[in-house]
Structures are given as structure tokens and as C-alpha cells.
Image (cartoon, rainbow, N blue to C red):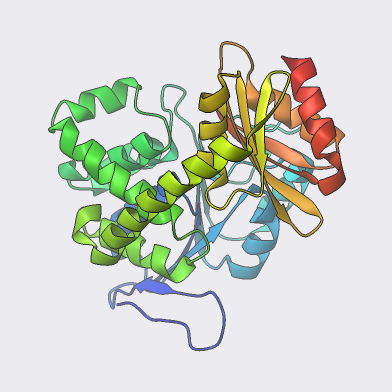
Amino acid sequence: MIQLPNNGTDEFILCKSLNASMELTILAHGDSDGVVSASLALAALKSSYDKVNVYFTHPYGLVEDFKAFAKGDVVIADIAISEDRSREVVDLFNRYEGKITYIDHHPPPKDVSLKELNAKVVRYEDAGSSSEMTFRLFSQLLPLDYDRIALYGAIADYSDLTRWVKRALARWDKRQIYFEAGILFQGLEGSRKMHDFKREVVLHLSEGKRPSQHSELLIRSLMQSIRNEELYRWVKENVKVSGMVSYVVDPPGSVGIAATYAKGLKGTPIGLAAERRGKIYSISLRGDPSVIDLNEALREIAHELGGSGGGHPEAAGARVPVKKLDDLIYLLNKAV
């Protein structure tokens, strides 16, 4: 059963089983990897719970969102633990009375051990995405062909070269899998804060349906393709270069895609796109991992500048005060 909120909250009940009496909360990232992970967890666990609620959060907002929404057992998927809030997360998890399953592929924080978490921590060292990890964790509870759903999330998260992905892809015509992954990524990219829509996609995928079978997702994907071409032209006209960093500020579209375009257009090791949100810049970066590990660099640099950062060696994000953007670029050049 789908129950839309009527009280102005962000709650959205995705399933209900009359044969169960427990509640499950899924907290996931709102990108393709997080949405796919949430859908796989929902598909695997929905028959065991009376009610399943899905919410979308991010590393810096995990503490507040956990306090606000966590009820019953909790599955957290594709949410890195922010360096500057890691101790808060440990304390919060350890006080929680329900069962917590934490599934994530990002590098753990440096100042705490994941063993300190009062949670079942799911990490496969040979996995590159939370989608892959979630499928492997719940594989005994899922139909075999749900591996293609996990593939959509892995591909969209730049994690399509692992041994499991290659083996799973061999079961399918990979051209179709990449086509569906593109629709999912493009459609979600054009729906960044539309949480109710993303929950519809979670439910859609949890039923084993392809992204192309969701008409609104398909239309949003096509619209995003048009926006991406417009964004490319804008970046081409506005990109600046500072040493090894090509960058744009306040692009009219996805900061992640803008960072990729900036890097590619100027041939620098790092591409950066910053979007102002009040007193901070929300920043996406793309880099050449043979030159710099963006995850390692940003965890130190952003923290030094009073912000936070991290992600993957080749694709990462950061949040820093507006006045610190030039310092960030300077320190990235120094790190290179």
C-alpha cells in the first residue's frame, strides 16, 4: 500500500503487510545508487514488516534526519559518515534501541572505527557501490533477476568495473542495462529535491520494473538530456582555470555534470562546480585518480576550511563557506 502524507511531513509509507507488526525505516541517499539500494532493501524486507518508511538524506544531514524519522529497525544505505559529525553518529547509533543495518561503500571516517557503531555494518571490499552491496546482502531474499536493478545503481555510480558487476552483466545484454541505467540517472538528476517522486521510483524498482517502464521518469530523463546539452554550452563559455583546476560557479544545472564538463573541456586533472546555498557552496568535483585522490584530499582540505568533504577518488563533493572557495581551489592545486 502507498500512503501519501497528509500532515505536511516528509513521511511516505511504501508498503504494509497485515501479517506483520514491526516497522522499518530506510534512510538512503537521493542519487541513483541510494534509490536503487532503497528499492532492493524494500523488496527484500517488506514482507517482514507492517510498515516501511523511506526517507532521503545525505552525510551532513544524517544525524538530524535519523533523530527525526528513525522508527523501529533501520536500514541506512549509501550515506557516508561525515568526518566532522562522526562522533555524533556513533553516539546516536549506540543510544538507539532498534536494529540498525548500515550499508555503505565510501571510505570510513578517520577519527572513529566502524566497529564502534551499534549496527550491522555491511561492507564488501571488492564492491564499488551500495547497490551491489545491498543486492549481495539480501540476495537470498530477492529474485535472481533483481541483479539488473543493482546493476543500474552500480553503473550510475561509476562502479561498473567490479568482479560482481562484470559477472552479473554477462547474464544480460549490457546495452539494454546501460540504457536503463542512463534513464534512471538522467531522470533522478532532473528531480533532485522531489522526494515523493523518488519514493515512487523506489517502489517501482522494488517491484522489479525497469526505469523505462516509469513514464514520468522516462520523460524527465529526456528533458534532462536537453538540459545537459544547454549546460555543456554554458560551461564552455564560463569555465575558468586556476592551475590544475577547471571550475565554474552556479551552473544552470547539475553540478556533478558541470564539473565533468569543466574537466573535459580544459583537460585539467580536476573539474569543479560550485553552487551557492546561503552562506556555503555545495561543490562537486571530478578528478584523475592517477594524479589526486579527491576523497583523501577533500576530507582534510574541506575540514581545514570549516566545511566537510569526501566521496570517491575520482568523484567527490564538499561543502565550504562561500568566502573559502578560492582557498579550496588553492589547496587542491597544492595537493596536486
Relative placement, left or right, of 230 versus 173 is: right
Q: Considering depth in this image, is 152 or 55 the residue closer to the camera?
A: 152
User: Would residue 11 be seen by someone viewing this image from the given angle?
Assistant: yes
Measured as percent of width and height from the top left, residue 2 is found at: 33, 77
| Residue occupying the point 53% across, 26% down | 265
Relative placement, left or right, of 113 versus 321 is: left
Residue positioned most to the bottom: 6
**Quarter occupied by residue 295:** top right
Measured as percent of width and height from the top left, residue 321 is found at: 83, 47
Measured as percent of width and height from the top left, residue 142 is found at: 23, 48
Of the 4 image quadrants, the one containing the N terminus is bottom left
Q: Considering depth in this image, is 254 or 75 the residue closer to the camera?
A: 254
In the rendered view, would you say 258 is above or below 159?
below
**Quarter occupied by residue 259:** top right
Q: How many numbered discs, if any? A: 0
| Residue occupying the point 48% across, 67% down | 194
User: Would residue 106 be seen by someone viewing this image from the given angle?
Assistant: no
| Residue occupying the point 49% across, 88% down | 6
In the rendered view, would you say 310 is above or below 254?
above
Measured as percent of width and height from the top left, residue 314 is found at: 55, 25
**Quarter occupied by residue 242:** top right
